[in-house]
Image (spheres, grey):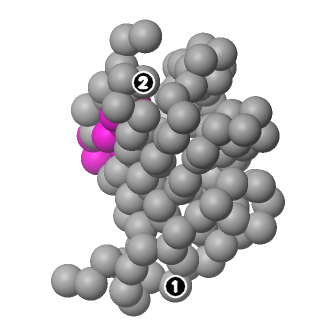
Amino acid sequence: MEPINIEGTPKTPTVRFDAREGVFEIRGRSIPENSVEFYKPIVDWLDNYKESPLQKTVVNIRLEYFNTSSSKCILDVFKKLEAIHKAKNDVEVNWYYEEDDEDMLEAGEDYESIIRVPFKMVEIVE
């Protein structure tokens, strides 16, 4: 499988998903004009990946900010990861947040309560 490499812009996050390493990363800001259009290739890629995932998949989410429409698309990404996890594969989500950003911490905790995948809250201390 070809990796996904999307360079971030002021409105869209950097996305790096590599099936060979099993390390996936979304970082930056997510306020695209059309969130569904932006996240669709990522969700489709995960559909393919779940056919033969690695034994362990690590997902690093390091967003500074995301809008409401992005939050729904991010949930769709997590649902694909949940399906991989349910198929007896190891999936771990590292949710990064700035030490004074309670909104981002709460967002991670909200996802953690919805999705049956192990989450680790990682505080970024500058």
Identify the magenta region. 9-17
The C terminus sits in image quarter: bottom left
Q: CA distance from mark 2 to mark 1?
A: 32 Å
Q: Secondary structure at mark 2?
A: loop
Q: Is residue 50 above or below residue 56?
A: above
- The answer to whether one can see residue 12 in this image is no
Question: Is 15 covered by the magenta stretch?
Answer: yes
First in residue order: circle 2 vs circle 1:
2
Q: Which residue is mark 1?
A: 102
Q: Position of residue 63 (x, y in %)?
A: 41, 58
| Callout 1 crowding tier (Cα within 10 Å): few <14, some 14–19, many ≥20 | few
Q: Position of residue 21 (x, y in %)?
A: 35, 31
Q: Position of residue 62 (x, y in %)?
A: 39, 59
Q: Residue at x 50, y 40 (%)?
A: 57
The N terminus sits in image quarter: top left
- The answer to whether one can see residue 97 in this image is yes
Q: Residue at x 42, y 34 (%)?
A: 22
Q: Identify which amino acid the numbered label 1 is placed on.
A: Glu
Tell me the number on the disc at residue 19. Answer: 2
Q: Secondary structure at mark 1?
A: helix
Q: Is residue 45 above or below residue 1?
A: below
62 with respect to 107 (left or right): left
